[in-house]
Amino acid sequence: MQQESQAAEFGIADARRVLGEVFAPWVMDLNLSIERFESAPSGDAADWQPGAILRLPFSERLCRNGGTVSGQALMAFADTAMVIANLAANRGYRAMTTVDQTMHFMRAVSSSDVLADARVVRLGRTMSFGRVTLLSATDNKPVAMVSSAFAML
């Protein structure tokens, strides 16, 4: 019962507020949006993981020479998405810092928004481990896979 109350207390509106207040101004310039925020399972809980789905809108400003979205923008997007996923897992804001992030680029993306499906695989007392799948919003095909670790401060 207490978990239900906690989950209801911190939802997508709170996550959007944190996105607007906690991150550096240049991250805000990416114009990210939170499309889904899952801090409690809504169906089959067997393989459910807390997380969020975010959108990075396409912008020529994020492109490298040749018109593809730069790896730097995608790395920042994945890192930010995992922070939001950690909000879901913690059912609220908790200070944290990235310890490790490994990204495997699968294909270039151009002229398309990018979606990040960020999930917390394991949340411990002092560490969090997660994965992010980046997808082209145009065809829903994978762009990159990311694994990360965060220290909970």
Image (tube, grey):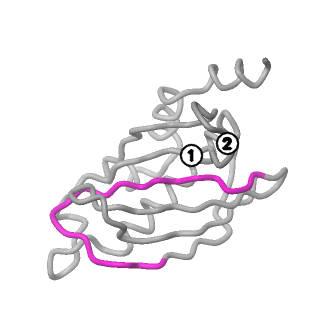
Q: Neighbour class for label 1 at 10 Å: few (<14), some, many (≥20)?
A: many
Decide which of tag 2 and tag 1 comes sooner along the chain. Answer: 1
Q: Quadrant of residue 139?
A: bottom left
Predominant secondary structure in magenta? strand
Residue 45 appears left or right of 54: right
Residue drawn at x 47%, y 41% is 19
Q: Neighbour class for label 2 at 10 Å: few (<14), some, many (≥20)?
A: many
Residue drawn at x 70%, y 40% is 90
Kindly identify which residue carries mark 1. 51
* Residue type (three-letter) at the residue carrying disc 1: Gly
All told, the count of numbered labels is 2
Q: Are marks 2 and 1 in contact (CB under 8 Å)?
A: yes
Kindly identify which residue carries mark 2. 89
Residue at the far bottom: name it.
65
* Residue type (three-letter) at the residue carrying disc 2: Ala
Which x, y percent locates residue 27? 40, 54
Question: Magenta includes 109?
Answer: yes
In the rendered view of the protein, which quadrant contains the N terminus?
Answer: top right
Residue span colored magenta: 104-123
Q: SS class of the residue under badge 2?
A: helix
Q: Quadrant of residue 143?
A: bottom left
Nearer to me, 142 or 72 = 142
